[in-house]
Amino acid sequence: MAEGVNKVILVGTLGFDPDHRMTNSGQAVATLRMVTNESYFDKTTGSRKETSEWHRVVVWGKTADLVKQYLRKGRQVFIEGKLKTRDWEKDGQKRTTTEIQAQRVVFLGGRGEGGGARDERPAPSRGGAEAPARGPEASADSEPPPADGFKEFSDGIDDDNVPF
């Protein structure tokens, strides 16, 4: 029998600052509350409608620490993970929630979008999380990236120097 697939991919906006805490065993965990928006054309009214869906995302370990440091309300984020349902009891009532357990987090948007603790840009790191490309050691007088987010790489390189 074939195994199932439990995969979630979201691109949305943080509705609140991340909630960061430590477990009793000392492991970092962050909870993100993010919203995804969708628009569609309603044939009955002839108008465009928008819907919003809220998601709870749980991030563990070093990625949780990076989320705490770099993400703020309003920032766009890409999440890749899996659905996880958990049960607990509170005041004699059984409660259930379904969350997204993040396996990969990518910080989207450029400088100034959604606040952010600093103006760092994301870049891939080990462990499936995305980490800021520049750390606190980046100087304030360094040249800011162009508005479109791409840097011109013409530092003396021409077509003859490219190996492909």
Image: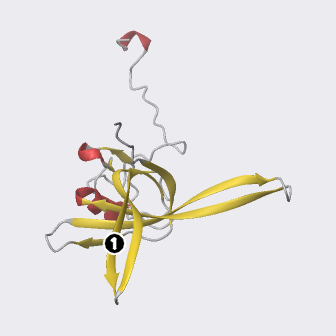
Q: Residue at x 24, y 46 (%)?
A: 127
**Relative vertical location of residue 125 with respect to residue 116 in this rendering, above or below:** above
Among the 4 quarters of the image, the one containing residue 60 = bottom left
Q: Is residue 74 left or right of residue 125?
A: right
Q: Quadrant of the N terminus?
A: top left
Residue placed furthest toward the bottom: 91
Among the 4 quarters of the image, the one containing residue 162 = top left
Q: Is residue 35 left or right of residue 99?
A: right
Counting from the top left corner in percent of width and height, residue 160 is at 40, 9
Q: Is residue 14 left or right of residue 46?
A: left
Counting from the top left corner in percent of width and height, residue 29 is at 27, 66
Q: Out of 9 and 161, give the one closest to the viewer.
A: 9
Residue 75 shows in the view = yes
**Relative vertical location of residue 125 with respect to residue 117 in this rendering, above or below:** above
Residue placed furthest toward the top: 160
Q: Quadrant of the C terminus?
A: top left
Q: Which residue is mark 1?
A: 87
Counting from the top left corner in percent of width and height, residue 118 is at 38, 61
Q: Residue at x 39, y 72 (%)?
A: 96
> Mark 1, residues whose alpha carbon is within 10 Å: few (<14), some, or many (≥20)?
few
Please tell me whether mark 1 sits on a helix, a strand or a loop: strand
The amino acid on which the numbered mark 1 sits, given as a three-letter code, is: Asp
